[in-house]
Image (cartoon, rainbow, N blue to C red):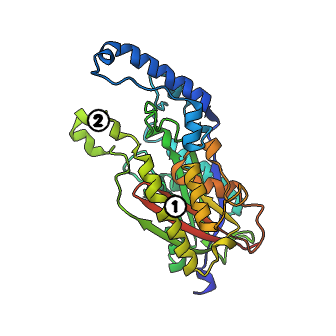
């Protein structure tokens, strides 16, 4: 492979919504809804016709997930027991959509960090778990807003969308079809979360990330070599969201709980942890990288317990915060953006030659690995 076809990560960007919901605030809102529901259905509950809802607690949330807070685009309606869903003014077709808006902000930060002008970028990939609309593609709107003359398309592989996007961008570089590609992940996951479900009402938060993947020949001196990437999918119903435009053919089902995020958490934990750990170890072996030589693991931020177990299986010992940093506690699960947030916030202290791993995993099942080495 010639030098002009070596993909690297030139820079990253991060947009964090200014509003945040603490576990204490979330539990107060959820429990208010539970008390109201149980009071309104007291007669049916007494007759065993309706099951009472169970109260949530800060202790339950933190033990189950490790999450302590999450950033959101619309705090007040999420905490309103009468709404418990994001709400904002609908925008016209000629206005920048909210998903594109936050994606542009993250992308502009990445471009500035790399010293790159939009006109020098060839493509935009919008890689996220939920798209605001079917078409036009979110990527094309972001491309237009940034002023990029090239092409763009959307990628949706749930929580693995960003790593799938990075491999796709790297493949464009390797083939010579592009020299500079933006992978943008605007994740407004508060929109697909069932805020009235005790088992999942605490999981997700909103954010946007951007990764600039470029040819090494034009990258800034301080970049990250992409040593190798690997993608894997295995069909599973254990994480699912049945929302889609075909639901309109059956309007009676439009409000069903399965049109939002649902999962079998214990099954996911049991099946995904060994799958991801084995995938990482196999790819490290193919790349001739000793797993215990990995300086840092930037893992998907879904569950603290899953990350501890995966890191232990890969490194051969219990990973500390320096080896496997966590952003889950303050950001919550941000789907595909999680591992990129961890990379963005916890990469600058590494030295030239240090090797690390960006890894995501989630619904599908899907998983993606990106092994990187700091160049300077």
Percent of width and height locating residue 354: 73, 71
Find residue 124 and name its label.
Answer: 1
Please identify the residue farthest to the left as the structure is shown: 249
**Left or right: residue 351 compared with residue 194:** right
Q: Is residue 73 visible?
A: no
- Select label 1 or label 2 by which is in front: 2
Q: CA distance from mark 1 to mark 2?
A: 32 Å
| Residue 320 seen in render | yes
Give the percent coordinates (x, y) of residue 242: 32, 45
Out of 147 and 131, give the one closest to the viewer. 131
Q: Are marks 1 and 2 in contact (CB under 8 Å)?
A: no
Element type where label 2 sits in the image:
loop
Q: Quadrant of the N terminus?
A: bottom right
Q: Residue at x 56, y 43 (%)?
A: 65
Considering depth in this image, is 26 or 277 the residue closer to the camera?
Answer: 277
> Label 2: which residue?
254
């Amino acid at each position: 492979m010639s030098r002009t076809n070596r993909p690297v990560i030139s820079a990253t960007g991060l947009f964090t919504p200014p509003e945040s919901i603490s576990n204490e605030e979330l539990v107060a809102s959820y429990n208010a809804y539970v008390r109201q529901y149980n009071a309104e259905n007291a007669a049916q509950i007494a007759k065993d016709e309706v099951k009472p809802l169970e109260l949530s607690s800060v202790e339950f949330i933190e033990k189950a997930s490790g999450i302590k807070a999450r950033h959101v685009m619309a705090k007040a309606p999420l905490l309103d027991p009468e709404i418990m869903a994001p709400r904002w003014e609908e925008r016209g077709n000629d206005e920048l959509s909210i998903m594109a808006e936050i994606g542009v902000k993250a992308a502009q930060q990445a471009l500035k960090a790399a010293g790159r002008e939009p006109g020098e970028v060839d493509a935009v990939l919008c890689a996220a778990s939920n798209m605001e609309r079917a078409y036009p593609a979110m990527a094309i709107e972001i491309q237009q807003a940034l002023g990029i003359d090239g092409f763009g398309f959307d990628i949706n592989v749930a929580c693995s969308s960003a790593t799938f996007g990075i491999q796709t961008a790297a493949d464009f570089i390797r083939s010579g079809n592009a020299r500079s590609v933006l992978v943008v992940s605007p994740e407004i996951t508060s929109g697909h979360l069932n805020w009235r479900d005790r088992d999942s009402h605490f999981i997700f938060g909103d954010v946007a990330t951007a990764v600039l993947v470029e040819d090494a020949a034009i990258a800034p001196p301080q970049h990250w070599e992409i040593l190798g990437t690997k993608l894997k999918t295995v069909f599973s119903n254990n994480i699912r969201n049945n929302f889609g435009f075909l639901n309109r053919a059956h309007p009676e089902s439009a409000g069903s709980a399965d049109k939002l995020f649902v999962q079998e958490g214990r099954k996911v934990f049991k099946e995904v942890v060994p799958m991801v750990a084995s995938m990482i170890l196999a790819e490290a072996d193919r790349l001739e990288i000793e797993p215990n030589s990995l300086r840092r693991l930037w893992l998907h931020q879904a569950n603290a317990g899953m990350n501890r177990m995966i890191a232990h299986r890969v490194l051969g010992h219990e990973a500390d915060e320096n080896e496997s940093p966590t952003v889950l506690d303050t950001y919550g699960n941000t789907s595909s953006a999680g591992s990129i947030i961890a990379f963005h916030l916890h990469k600058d202290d590494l030295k030239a030659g240090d090797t690390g791993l960006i890894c995501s995993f989630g619904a599908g099942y899907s998983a993606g690995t990106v092994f990187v080495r700091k160049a300077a």
